[in-house]
Image: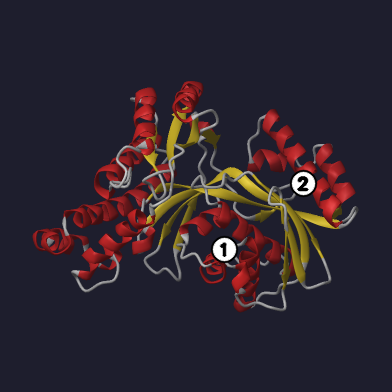
Amino acid sequence: MMATTTQLKQQIGSGVYDGAFAALYAADSATIAAQRARYLRTIENFEKNFGVDREVSLYSAPGRTEIGGNHTDHNNGVVMAAAVNLDIIAVVSKNQDNAVRFISEGFGKIDDIDLSILTPQQPESEHSASLIRGVAAGIVAKGGRVGGFDAFSTSEVLRGSGLSSSAAFEVCVGAIFRGEYNDNDMELLDQVEIAKIGQYAENVFFGKPSGLMDQTACAVGSAITIDFKDPAAPVVNKVEFDLAGKGFALCISDTKGSHADLTDDYAAIRREMESVAACFGKKVLRDVDENEFLAAIPDVRKKVGDRAVVRAIHFYNDCRRAAQLCEAVKADDFDRFLQLILDGGHSSFEYNQNAYSNKNVREQGVPLALAVSQRVLQGRGAWRLQGGGFAGTIQAFVPMDLLDEYRAAIDAVFGAGSCHVLSVRNYGAIRVAPQL
């Protein structure tokens, strides 16, 4: 699997990796050719920065999209997510310096991390170096080994798009340490463990209190449900998902809304759900029996208000729906899947109420994108807001024969390139080999 940079370029150029590229991205010749060029460019950039003919390995980790379970993870609920065919790739070579030197294309700097220090460093907070150091610390705490490597990476995971570029980076680094220093030991460091280590790095070293959905979806790949009843040991169920085989594309559309001043909007959802749970002496809604909650609504609404109550109703329904979405995929019932997507979209808009901010009612890009989607796809496909909401991106499952019309309609409203056409990727964070 190891090869020098020269050998690897020859192999990629001659098509040895075409099967891997088809599996990771898409089987059409144009996509394969584009990935050949991308990988070759990344290897050449590695050579420019770290030297020619070093032995190297290739790694890849995908971005992710939320499919079901909108704002349910923070109350220990159930979500459905999927890896997508936009990824971060890294060309990696071990060194003897016990240091990680990592260059990310487009960032203009090198992260240089001394692995003899595996505690948070304040100057690194909210920078990628903290994630590398945090992942290394998490692997050591798990009983794994770490060591130095040089890496050059490129990323196609759209930043700020709700596709989790930071989680993809974290689990890619985890996969590198697993592959280079732990013999790719999937028992010691399985995909969920790599995800948990990524979350630890983001929470403790980077300083962001993220949940575990993003890292798990990026690490595991495919379409998955994640049950967070025990957040320390989430239950992950995986199912392969062939959208193209159903004649559909996954579209993520950027409504170009500002995320400024939305922190309290996001926090209020969690705060209000937990206020309902507190009425029953519990910390999170997952610990409150749904029937007990429903029977107590007259009293609960007096204590915490109606919006908290309807957001709690959304929580229970969307947890159930996330599991049903996965079952629909397993049962090959795609019509049922699409209807559940629409139902979840309505619940997020009407009950969870995170389609737009009440602080700025003139800016309603998410509802507008949903309205455009409904106009084009009425009676076919499905559409919903995703992620935190209030601004940002929406998701749509679009029949291939309507794809050009749909993309043109979205781009006409929000600007050229606003609609991104993706597919579900059935591989998580991996070392890339000719045969996957």
- Image quarter in which the N terminus is found: bottom right
Q: Nearer the viewer, mark 1 or mark 2?
A: 1
* Rendered view: 355 above or below 129: above
Q: Is residue 385 visible?
A: yes
Q: Which mark is residue 42?
A: 2
- Give, as a three-letter code, the residue at label 1: Glu
Q: Which mark is residue 372?
A: none
| Left or right of 41 in this view: 396 | left
Tag 2, which secondary structure?
A: helix
* Rendered view: 176 above or below 104: below
* Rendered view: 165 above or below 244: below
Residue at image coords 53%, 66%? 196
Residue at image coords 89%, 48%? 6
Where residue 160 appears, x then y in whole percent? Answer: 52, 47
Q: Nearer the viewer, residue 176 or 417?
A: 417
Q: Which residue is identified by label 1?
A: 126
Where residue 414 appears, x then y in whole percent? Answer: 46, 30
Residue at image coords 74%, 40%? 38
Whole-number angstrom distance, CA of label 1 to CA of label 2: 25 Å
Q: Nearer the viewer, residue 66 or 408?
A: 408
Check the image and tell me how it is coloured: secondary structure
Where residue 313 appears, x then y in whole percent? Answer: 23, 53
Contact between marks 1 and 2 (CB within 8 A): the answer is no
Q: Residues within 10 Å of mark 1 (few under 14, many from 20)?
A: some
